[in-house]
Amino acid sequence: MKSYSEITPYIEKMAQKSNEGNGIMPDMYAKYKVNRGLRDLNGNGVVTGLTEVSNIQAKKVLPDGTTVPCDGQLFYRGINVRDLVAGFRADGRLGFEETVYLLLFSKLPTAEELEEFCAVLSEYRSLPTSFVRDMILKAPGKDMMNIISRSVLALYAYDENPDDTSVQNVLRQCLQLIAMFPLLSIYSYHSYQHYHLGKSLFIHHPKPGLSTAETLLNILRENGEYTALEASILDLALVLHAEHGGGNNSTFTTHVVTSSGTDTYSAVSAALGSLKGPRHGGANIKVVRMFDDMQQSINTKSEGEIKDYLAKLLNREAFDKMGLIYGMGHAVYSLSDPRSDILKQCARDLAIEKGKEEEYELYETVARVAPEIIAEKRKMYKGVSTNVDFYSGLIYRMLELPCELFTPLFATARIAGWSAHRIEEIQNAGKIIRPAYINVKEEMEYRCLNER
C-alpha cells in the first residue's frame, strides 16, 4: 500500500481539482436555513430523538419563559450523577458496575443484584482462544482505537448468533463487550509498546472478582499493583465518562447505525470510529500536552506569565496555534460541568498522594484565570468553566497512564452508554434514521467524451 511519502503528482493534481470543485461556502448554511453540525445559531442541539438514558441540565426556565444559565447537572436514568457518586463513595465502594447496571436496566441494583451482575461481568471478562495472538499481536498498530475497533469487528466471527437483534441477544453481546473492553484496550497498548517502541511484552490474564478499574490497573502494570485510591479515582472517571446526554457524536452514531438493523459489533465499531476523532474523544490528551508546553515555555510560578500564555493560545500564537484553551468551555454547560466539579477534589487527593501538589496548583490557577481571559478576548456572554477533560487528563497523568490509553479508557467507559442507547433504539424505533441534505449544485448537461 502506498505511504504518505509516495503521494504521486496525479493525486496532488486531483486533490486540487476536488478542492476547486467545492462550491459550498459557510454563509450558505444560513441562506438555506441548515443547522450545521445539528446546532442552531444559539448553539442548541437539533432534537433528533427521544431517550430515557440520560439528561443534561445547563439552563433554568424562568416564569416568563426566558432561560438563564445554571450550574450543570447530569442525570443517568433520572438520577443525579452527583448523588450517584456521593452514594457509592460514602459506602467506600467502587461504582462503575453499579452505573452500568443503572444505564442498562433503568434502576439501581439491590446488593444481591449487584453481586450477581459483577459476577457475570467477571465471567465474561475473557477473549476467545488465541484471539490476542491472532488479532492483536500479529497485526500491531500505532493507534489503540483502530486496534480495538478491528478487534470488535473480528469478534463477530466468534459469535454463534451475531446477527440476532433481539433485545435478549443484544444485551448478551453488550455485556460481553463491556467486560472485554479493558482487555482490548490494555492488550492493544502492550502490542504497540512491544512492536513499535521495542519494549518488553507481557500479558496479564484478568483476575476473577476484580472491578473494571482494578482490572485495568492490574493488567496494565507489569507488577500488577495499585493503591485503593488509584482504583477509586479511575473508577470514578469511568463513571463520569459512561454516558452523556445522548446528543454526543458517538452516541448519535450508535443510534444511526443501529436503526439500519445491523449487528452489535458493527454498531460499536462505528461508535469507536467517532470517538477516535480529536473533536470528540481526544480532548484530554490536548489538555495534558498544552500544560506540558506551558511548563516548558514559561515560568509557571508567575501568574502574569500564565495569563500571557493563555492570551497567546487564544491569539493562535502558542502550542498548536488553534486558538483554543483546551479543557475550558463546553457546548452545553456554561456555569459548570458537574463531571469536572466531581473530579476536581479527586485530582487534589491524588496529587497529595503522588506528591504532585505543585502541578495541581498550576491547573487551579489556569481554571481561575482562563474564564476571565476568554471572556475578554472572545467577548463571550455564555459562561465558561472547566470541562471534564480538564481534570481527567491530569488524573490519568498522575495515575501514570500513557496518553495512548486516554481515548481507549473513554471507550471502556462509554461502551456502557452506547449499549443502553443501542437497546433503546431497538426497543423503540423501527425506522431507519435518514437525514435530508439540500443539494446546491446546479444541473449540468452531459457532454460526450469527444466534446469535453
Image (spheres, helix red, strand yellow):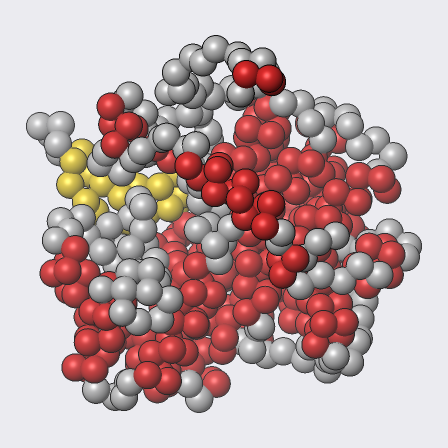
Q: Return the residue nearer the eye: 413 or 280.
A: 280
Which residue ends up furthest to the left in the rendered image? 64
User: Residue 144 vs residue 1: left or right?
Assistant: left
290 shown above or below 362:
above
Q: Residue reaching furthest front?
A: 450
Q: Residue at x 31, y 46 (%)?
A: 331
Q: Position of residue 271 (x, y in %)?
A: 58, 42
Give the image location of residue 93, x and y in percent: 55, 63
Task: Name the residue furthest right.
Answer: 129
Residue lying at 27% horizontally and 38% vertically, measured from the top left: 43
Residue 412 in view of the camera: no
Residue sitting nearer the eye, 439 or 296:
439
For residue 56, side relative to residue 89 (left or right): left
Question: Residue at 38% across / 78% down in the picture?
Answer: 293
Side (left or right) of 301 relative to 82: left
Toward which corner of the image does residue 202 lie, by quadrant? bottom right
How many labels were placed on the picture?
Answer: 0
Can residue 372 be seen in the rendering of this structure? yes
Q: Relative to 377, is 437 on the left or the right?
A: right
Residue 178, relative to residue 17: is it above or below?
A: below
For the point 63% across and 23% down, the residue is 260
Q: Quadrant of residue 451?
A: top right
**Residue 90, position as x, y percentages in the image:** 45, 63
Q: Position of residue 283 (x, y in %)?
A: 43, 59
